[in-house]
Amino acid sequence: MIVAERKSIEQIEAMLEGFDRILLVGCGTCVAVCMAGGEKEVELLAAELRMKGKMEGRQRTVDEITITRQCDKEYLEALAKYVDQYDVILSAGCGAGVQFLAERYEDKIVLPALNTRFIGVAEGAGVWTQRCMACEDCILDQTGGICPMTICAKNLLNGPCGGTDHGKCEVDSEKDCAWTLIYNRMKKLGRLDYIKKIQPPKDYSVMTKPGKYTHEAFKEARQED
Amino acid sequence: MPNKFKEAFDQKEFVVTAEVGPPKGTDIGRLIEDIDLLKDKIDGLNVTDNQSSVMRISSLAVCRMILDRGGEPILQMTCRDRNRMALQSELLGAAVLGVPSVLCLSGDAITVGDHPKAKPVFDLDSVQLLQAVGLLNGGKDLSDNELQGPTDLFPGAVVTPEADPIEPQLLKFEKKIAAGAKFIQTQAIYDMDNFKQFMDNVRHHDTKIMAGVVLLVSAGMAKYMNKNVPGIMVPDALIEEMAAAPKGERLDAGIRIAGRMIRQLREEKICDGVHIMAIGKEDRVPDILEAAGMSPAD
């Protein structure tokens, strides 16, 4: 899932400077799971913003609503009947959600309440780690299910650099060396031959931004139209 | 292209290289002194590439300075700061400027240096960079385009014999040889028994191996490296030898140790040569060679 964290209250307040009617929109999917922008989190943030407004003696309205997903048009429609009452929409979605909201309500100022971190997993209670760079050409079949593009700080494809030390990374001694993990896993699986092959340079042309993907079934449907 | 460094492997039993680190800024007085002092005493002079991820004069520029002063440069190239276009373009530049040898490295992480906010590139890794050199030497680029004139570069790479664990390191080492590395410089070695064992494992490869020797300047430096530099292990006996030296004579003790190691590497024919890293004490490289019993003419 997408992992995000909330911006500091100071950053959020700085963005809201001059706006008194604020619609805070939560997202019920990824960012709810990582406790950054779901129903509970926007409730707390809204309360904090209201309190700050009160303490500063401002006429501030902060209302919150959480929709299922900010990255799906159908859920964004539910906001249509409210948005005119506000100066600004503060989105607690990931970067994709903020942009989709801004696109749907193009006359409104839409601001981000979160910093989007990465695609990752819940490693433990309250801890998420990055696992995928969305490089569009998955090679996990050849690396024992451990991604050198993501786990190696230098995204090295052919083995460790000289900075590896006792299975840890030179960039952060708390982090594992991807290539020590990969080597050990492939050895255990009896598949060392796979990592003995020289990997060619990555094809970055498939990662040309912004990415667009149409499902095969829908391509055919469009052609039929 | 004439290549005195490459020829040295054919003509000599033991090849000696050292290195200079380009300064940060345009004051090159000391650099020129070091180049002039060393150029006739060794077979090649490595020029580091933004070493430790600290921004400095470009390696290629200093390589050309060395050529102009009659020395034999070895261009260090890392994959950290340039994508495959810039790397190949610089390799072509090296070829036309007369820089004959290139050492291919991944490069230190950006975050350990003085521009930690910069974008790390790593479009290629060191194995793929070696392959790029091979392609350019064959008259083609990484996209299979024909060149108007090939390069004739002598490619090398590095290895860390004391890496722990060693298996992933050897996996990459073998890929480097397969990708065309004709010479190998090792990370600093201090434990000769460990190094001999490493050499026993890799001797069969068709490549020249040069042991890395880093000049110790104090016991503290040795302890610091043991703690902080991956793949460097200074044995306790050497740390004690450095600590036992009276103040003011510690550098001399380091020179004596480096000289003794080089003498053993050479006399016992353990490897094909030595790469001396005298970090900041380049002017003492001749003393190290003298301590090793090697006259400049060797």
Image (cartoon, helix red, strand yellow):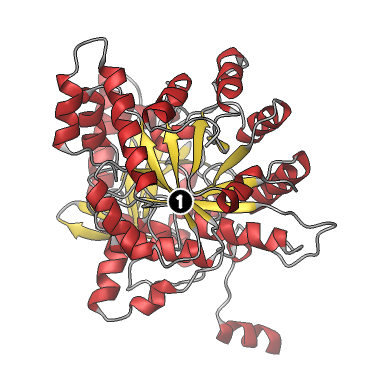
The picture quadrant where one finds residue B142 is bottom right
Q: Is residue A213 above or below residue A10?
A: below
Q: Is residue B270 above or below residue B53?
A: below
Q: Nearer the viewer, residue A58 or B88?
A: B88
Residue A125 position within the rendered picture, expressed as x and y whole percent measured from the top left: 14, 55
10 Å neighbourhood of mark 1: few (<14), some, or many (≥20)? many
Task: Name the outermost residue toward the top.
Answer: B248
Q: Is residue B25 above or below residue B238?
A: above
Q: Residue at x 34, y 58 (%)?
A: B199
Q: Amino acid at mark 1?
A: Asp
Q: How many marks?
A: 1
Task: Name the outermost residue toward the right.
Answer: B148
Q: Residue at x 54, y 52 (%)?
A: B156
Q: Nearer the viewer, residue A132 or B130?
A: B130
Q: Secondary structure at mark 1?
A: loop
Residue A151 position within the rendered picture, expressed as x and y whole percent measured from the top left: 35, 57
State which chain disc 1 sits on.
B
Residue A138 position within the rendered picture, expressed as x and y whole percent measured from the top left: 46, 72
Q: Is residue B123 visible?
A: yes
Q: Residue at x 49, y 30 (%)?
A: B295
Q: In this image, B232 relative to B129: left or right?
A: left
Q: In this image, A23 relative to B191: left or right?
A: right
Residue A159 position within the rendered picture, expressed as x and y whole percent measured from the top left: 40, 61
Q: Is residue A93 visible?
A: no
Q: Residue at x 57, y 38 (%)?
A: B44
Q: In this image, A191 relative to A80: left or right?
A: left
The residue tagged 1 is: B272
Q: Nearer the viewer, residue B263 or A108?
A: B263
